Amino acid sequence: MMHLRQLKIANFGPVVVCEQIEEYVRLLKKNRDARFVAFLRATCSCNNQPIPANQEKVLRLLLEKADHLLPSLTVSGKGSEMTVVAKLGALNDKNPEVVLDLSEYCSPDPDALKGSHRIQNLMDGTAAGMDEKDKAVIYVFRCLELFSELTLGRNQAALKFLLTSQRMHFRFCA
């Protein structure tokens, strides 16, 4: 991976060189890898303070020009009957379309591995024998974390995009 060079711009803290953000979006277009999303997320803030220039760059490159890399989510049901289905479109032969029922990872069954622990183990990389489905779940959660980081500091452009864009495909069914 590319060496992380940083610049100091005004009082916004370290800002990753724009070419690095562009490179990671290019890498995502070839291979849907949660580590690339985690990098993009890390570029959006420093010490819990937003870096507006990087937020804008990620927003423009990923959300506005490559939204096919992001999951669409459908939430249905209520309470313990709620399900969340995530769909990742196909990128290529190596990254086919994936449909995930995320509620499988939050099982209320006391004999099953607790949902939060299962997710945490996956996110930490400590889950033994991760398959492609588990990797896709990590990717979806990293995307959700990225959305959170893009809105840090009340970034109005990111909030507007996430809340109103037809391309975000968030759908709630009763």
Image (spheres, helix red, strand yellow):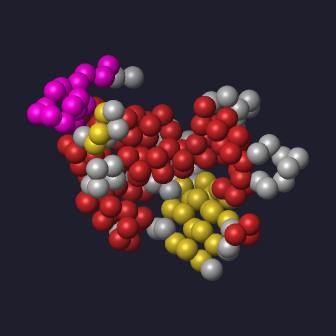
In the displayed image of the protein, which residue is found farthest to the top?
Answer: 3
- Residue at screen point 57% across, 50% down: 96
Q: Does residue 61 appear in this view? A: no
Q: Pinpoint residue 150: horizontal percent, then vertical percent.
A: 34, 49
| Residue 154 left/right relative to 166 | left
Picture layout, residue 116 above or below residue 18: below
Magenta stretch holds residue 8? yes
Please name whichever residue, 168 or 147, is drawn nearer the observer in this view of the structure.
Answer: 147
In the rendered image, the vertical position of residue 79 relative to residue 20, given as above or below? below
Q: Report the quarter where the C terminus lies.
A: bottom right
Q: Position of residue 161 (x, y in %)?
A: 32, 63
Q: Quadrant of residue 99?
A: bottom right
- Residue 13 located within the stretch drawn in magenta: yes
How far across and how far down the image is residue 158, in percent?
30, 57
Q: Residue at x 46, y 68 (%)?
A: 169
As drawn, the residue found furthest toward the left would be 10
Can residue 72 be seen by looking at this rendering?
A: yes
Q: Which residues are magenta?
A: 3-18
